[in-house]
Image (spheres, rainbow, N blue to C red):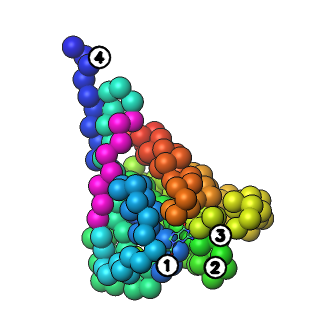
Amino acid sequence: MADSEVNEHLFKVLVVGDASVGKTSIIKRFVHGIFSSNYKATIGVDFALKVVQWDDNTVVRLQLWDIAGQERYGNMTRVYFRESVGGFVVFDVTARKSFEAVERWLSDLVEKVRLPSGEPIPIVLLANKVDLLDDEGEAFMKDEELAELVGRFGITAVFATSAKQDIGINEASSALIEAILENE
Ligand code: GDP
Ligand code: MG
């Protein structure tokens, strides 16, 4: 029967941002439901797969590509970007420098990655480690610079997250999946 058909999607999603902003921790939280304060720094690229039952007839497999921030992409650039359909750009709300680097990461994604249609991939920005702020990132979310970046790069959404306290990660992923599905 047509209405019992299950649509399965495999989406390659890039996770970028400076070193130690919490990229690997966010992925571990999202995929395995755990947090540990002593992960080894990612070397090169790591992959993780998260299977999401999106609705009754849609299963989404997110293949998350985690990269070591300090090394940039090295000589893996083309392999890393190829066929990706969405991205998370992560910064640490307690590290100003990691926020300043967001613009560079966004420029990179916009310049180097395109969907087959020629459109840029949808990007969701994650303001991570909000557990370390007293206001759960509220002040940050109203930041004018942040609003400017969102407008200029056409960012899909911004979420305050915490891998430690499991804040905002599922919501952010849903927003990205929704945007990716709209491009299908
Ligand atoms: P990556 O280099 O971007 O992959 O960052 P990691 O995931 O390795 O995290 C770097 C450090 O920040 C580790 O000590 C993590 O435990 C810590 N960390 C990551 N996410 C959070 C968070 O949401 N809150 C807090 N308090 N610490 C975090
Ligand atoms: Mg890492």
Answer whether residue 168 is magenta in the image: no
Secondary structure, mark 3, is helix
Answer with mark 4 or mark 3, whichever residue precedes in sequence.
4
Query: What separation in Å lies between label 1 and label 3 (alpha carbons)?
Result: 14 Å
Mark 2 C-beta closer than 8 Å to ligand 1: no
**Residue 80 in the image: above or below residue 158:** below
Measure the C-alpha gap from mark 1 to mark 2: 10 Å
Q: Which residue is the site of mark 3?
A: 132
Q: Earlier in the sequence, mark 1 or mark 3?
A: 1
Q: What residue would you read off at disc 4?
A: 3
Q: Report if the beta carbon of the residue with label 1 is closer than 8 angstroms to ligand 1.
A: yes
Q: Is mark 4 within 8 Å of ligand 1?
A: no
Residue 133, x across and y down, in percent: 70, 67
Residue 146 appears left or right of 25:
right
- What is the three-letter code of the residue carrying label 4? Asp
Which amino acid lies under the numbered mark 1 shown in the image of this protein?
Answer: Ser
The picture places residue 98, in percent across and down from the top left corner, at: 59, 78
Is the residue 52 above or below the residue 94 in the image?
A: above
State the SS at label 1: loop
Give the distance between the C-alpha atoms of the residues marked 4 and 2, in whole angstroms: 49 Å
Q: Nearer the viewer, mark 1 or mark 3?
A: 3
The residue that mark 2 highlights is: 95
Any part of residue 84 in sight: no
Foreground pick, 163 / 5: 163
Measured in 3D between alpha carbons, the distance from the residue under mark 1 to the one under mark 4, in whole angstroms, is: 45 Å
Residue extent of the magenta highlight: 47-54
Asked whether the beta carbons under mark 1 and mark 2 sit within 8 Å of each other, the answer is yes
- Labels 3 and 2: the sequence-earlier one: 2
Q: Residue at x 57, y 54 (%)?
A: 167
Q: Which residue is mark 1?
A: 20
